[in-house]
Image (spheres, rainbow, N blue to C red):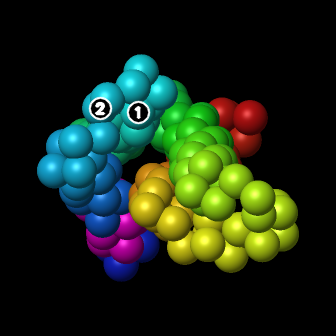
Amino acid sequence: MSEIEQTYRRFLLVVAGGLFVGTVIELILAEHYQDAVQWIPFGLSAMGVLLVVWAWLRPQAQSLKALRYGMIVTAAGSLFGVYEHLVHNFGFELEIRPNATASQVLFDALAGANPLLAPGTLFLAALLAYAATYKHPLLTSRSTN
C-alpha cells in the first residue's frame, strides 16, 4: 500500500471518528436521552469510535472486517433514526391538526422538530469508515478470502 493511500485511509478514519465523537456531543447538548430508544445513537457512536481506533492501531484483516460489519450496523441504525424522527414528526403534526389528512401534514413532518438529517450523520460516519477499508490490501489478498 502506498503512503498516499495509507494517508487517505487514515484521513477517512479520523473524519469518521470525529463524526462519532461529535454526534455524542450533539446528542448530549440536545438532551437526546429521554427514552430508551434515544440511547441507540450513543451505543452506535461508541461502537464506531472503538472500531475506528482498533482499525487505526491494529490494521489487520480481523479489525478491518469488524469495522466493516460495525459500519453496516451503524448505517442501519442511522436509517432507523431517520424513520423514528419522521414518525414522531408525523405524529406531532397529526396531533396539532387532528382533522388533517396524512398527505396534508407530510411536508410539515419532513421539516419538523426532529431533524431527519441528524441521524444521517451516523450514516455518513459509517460510510467514511467503510470507505477506509475499500480494496484494502489486507482484505483483498488471497490469504484472507
Question: Which labelled disc corresponds to residue 33?
Answer: 2
Outermost residue to the top = 36
User: In which quadrant of the rendered image does the C terminus lie?
Assistant: top right
On the question of residue 84 being in view, the answer is yes
- Foreground residue, 48 or 43? 43
On screen, residue 87 versus residue 39, left or right, reads right
- Residue 8 among magenta residues: yes
The residue located at (22%, 42%) in the rendering is: 31
Outermost residue to the front = 99
Dominant secondary-structure state across the stretch colored magenta: helix
Which residue is under mark 1?
38
User: In which quadrant of the rendered image does the N terminus lie?
Assistant: bottom left
How far apart in space, not on screen, are marks 2 and 1 (Cα)?
A: 5 Å
- The x, y position of residue 78, in whole percent, is 55, 48
Mark 1 residue type: Gln
- Foreground residue, 111 or 5? 111
On the question of residue 43 being in view, the answer is no
- The x, y position of residue 111, in whole percent, is 54, 73
- The x, y position of residue 52, in whole percent, is 34, 44
- The x, y position of residue 2, in whole percent, is 41, 72
On screen, residue 63 versus residue 93, left or right, reads left
Residue span colored magenta: 6-14
Q: Is 42 above or below relative to 99?
A: above
The residue located at (39%, 25%) in the rendering is: 35
Q: Is 73 above or below relative to 92?
A: above
| Secondary structure category for the residue under label 2 | loop
Q: Alpha-carbon neighbours of circle 2 within 10 Å: few (<14), some, or many (≥20)?
A: some
The residue located at (42%, 21%) in the rendering is: 36
| Secondary structure category for the residue under label 1 | helix
- Residue 11 among magenta residues: yes
Lower position in the chain sequence, tag 2 or tag 1: 2
Dots 2, 1 in contact, CB < 8 A: yes
